[in-house]
Structure formats: structure tokens, C-alpha cells
Amino acid sequence: MNTGKTVFAQIMSFLPDYQFNKCVDKHKGNHRVRNFTCKEHFYVMGFAQLTYRESLRDIESCLTAFSSKLYHSGIKQPVSRSTLAEANENRDWRIYADFAQVLIREARRLYKQDNEFALDIDNMVYALDSSTIDLCLSLFPWAKFRKAKGAVKMHTLLDLRGSIPTFIHLTDGLCHDVNVLDHIVIEPGAIYVMDKGYVDYLRFYSQIHQQRGFFVTRAKDNMAARRVYSRKVDKTTGLKYDQSVKLTGFYIKKDYPDYLRRIKYQDKETGKIYVFLTNNFELSALLIAQLYKERWKIELFFKWIKQHLRIKSFYGTSRNAVYCQIWIAICMYLLVAILKKRLKLEHSLYTLLQVFSLTLFEKVTINELFINSIYKPTSSDNSNQLSIWDF
């Protein structure tokens, strides 16, 4: 039995202190701060994430109730809601955004061999999409989205081989999805799978094609193009045609002057017809269609994040407070994912989070929590879509 560290302290021991301090120093997070440092802020907000706290008052009450155990968990003393609110308003959210990138690199390294990718392909494959986090416009007037509705968009690039996000960018709801392509560093030879909301021929040509990357997307219904060449396809697989095309619109043919590949495919299960567009002429047409199908993993990532992390109700109304909370939530998800791999735990991330929420201040090793426990990695009847997180 561990008589020293609490479960919460053990979780936080996986936090790379040197890298965290570098992020704090870069943005001068502790400048003129005497009592409540950035690390304590991260710990308290991490506690709120792991225990599903609903409000600042809720956080304050729970920390006060466990005041005798806080010191050994890395939190010096109970934090008042005014102190926490001030930190959420004033601590630069970029500290936690930069730290998330540190954790992303570590998680990708650890999960590199856990390849759930079903296709036999050597290229790195990424899915790009965004998810909208709804906000009340009267409380969050900076989060413009619709006439009577506010929102924040979480744009994410997901590594489909390990289901780990490699890039996350937060914007208000009015930001068009295609603009995020300006912030992504394209890897030569990598394939980027996205829906037709990202179709921008100028960006596709200058930012992906000319950087020797590949894209797979769905063609818009009004795409102006002429067929140049047709390849033979096996129609028993659902393929209808595989064509090389040239854009013919007055402006778009200038935006993308090279050839494109257009593939029509009918899903046997649903009967739905898809028309794909890509600049990759090496892979088979059926493999291109299967690549797009793998894109569903990013939808599962968004669903999992929204269901299991505290990003629906917020502890502050400013942009900085909201961004701080979202980035710390992402950091905690990555921290638990890293812990799971390093401790060789077989349980799903969902199970780990549920157990941690009830045992944070117990003085027992994390491994002992799951020895002979009733928690076993299972998937409910209606949770096929969440099996991606049973790493």
C-alpha cells in the first residue's frame, strides 16, 4: 500500500516539469505572481476536469472539503473562486496550448506501435475536421456564430494510425473551416482526408500539392471539370468510375492548373454515392474510397471529448477563460493517455477517468486501483463508435 502520494499526485507526476516551465517562461505566466502559480492553476483546473466539477463554487467547496489532503497532492491550500476566476481571466491560454503540443508529441511516440489503421499503406494519414462547442451569445459576446447563438470551433488534425490529435486550433464559430489550412504544416508524402467543406482549389494547390502532400476530399456538386482520361474499374467493388479531370471554371482552373483525380463510389451498406477528389494518382481507386471511410475516427474523437471532458459548461465567460479550460481539458486527456501507456494499463481511457474521479485523494498506487477490480475493458451495445478509445 502506498502511504505517500495520492492518486492525483501520481497522475501529475507524469507531467514533464521542465517542458511545462519552459511554456510558462515563454509567455511570462508567473510574472508578478506570488501565491497562485501557473502550475497550481493547472493542477486545480486538472482536478476540476478529473472530478467533473460544474462551477467555480463547486471547485472551491470540494477543495475545502479535502483541504487536509491537498498539500500531498501538489496544491498548497484550498483556492477561492475569486482567485481561480482571476487566473482564468489573466493567465495566457497559450501556455497550456503550447504544453498540449509537448504532450501530443509524447503521446504520439508512445502510441506509435498501436496501429489501428486498417489499410495497407505506407503514407502517414491524417483526418482534418472541426467541432462546434455551443455557447450562449449573451454571456460570450465575443464568440460570434449565428444571430442568437455563440460558439467556439475546435479544428483538429487527427493521426489516423494512432488516433492522437497532432494539431488543434481554436477559433470563434464564424471562422470558416478552410481557413485552418493556413496554419497546418504539410508533411511531404502525407495524405490529408477532409470533407468537402474544406474544398479550396488555391489552397489545395499551393499549400498541399506544391508541398508534395496529398489530399482526399469529396467533390462539390457544382464542380466545373472536364474528363481527360478514364481508367478501368471493378464495378463489383462499388466503384463507378476513376477519371483524370481538369477544372474548367474561369477562376478555379487558375487556382488549380494541374490534373485532378475524380472517383465515384457507391457504398454497398448504405447505397449512398460519393464522388471523391484527390491529387494522388498512385493508390488504387478503392483504397482512396476506403481512406475517406477511415475519416470517421475524427468524429469519434470529438464525440469522446465532448462526452468525457468538462468543455460544455465553463468557469469563465472571457475568451481567455474558455480557451484555458479547453486546452487544460485536452492536456488532461493526453496526460491520462500517456499514463495508461507507461503503466501498461489495459483499461479504456473512459474507465480510467471514471475510477480517477472517485479516488483522486486515495493513497494507493494507480496499478493497485485496477488489480482484481471489477473494471474491465468492455464496450456497451451502443458504443461501437467509442471503441477507438479502448487503446
Image (cartoon, rainbow, N blue to C red):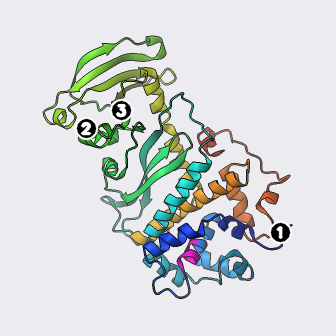
Local SS, label 2: helix
Q: Are marks 2 and 3 in contact (CB under 8 Å)?
A: no
Task: Report the residue marked by disc 3.
Answer: 218
* Pick the front one: 188 or 69: 188
Rendered-image quadrant of the N terminus? bottom right
Q: What x and y, as percent, mark residue 178?
A: 31, 47
Question: Label 1 is placed on what type of residue?
Answer: Asn
Q: Is residue 45 above or below residue 265?
A: below
- Quarter where residue 80 is shown: bottom right
The disc at residue 201 is: 2
Nearer the viewer's eye, disc 3 or disc 1?
1
Nearer the viewer's eye, disc 2 or disc 3?
2
- Quarter where residue 209 is shown: top left
Dot 2: within a 10 Å radius of its alpha carbon, few (fewer than 14), some, or many (20 or more) residues?
some
Separation of residues labelled 3 and 1 (CA atoms): 55 Å
Question: Label 3 is placed on what type of residue?
Answer: Arg
- In the image, taking residue 119 as reference, residue 212 lies left or right, namely left
Q: What x and y, as percent, mark residue 122?
A: 50, 32
Dot 1: within a 10 Å radius of its alpha carbon, few (fewer than 14), some, or many (20 or more) residues?
few
Task: Report the residue marked by disc 1.
Answer: 2
Q: Residue at x 45, y 17 (%)?
A: 238
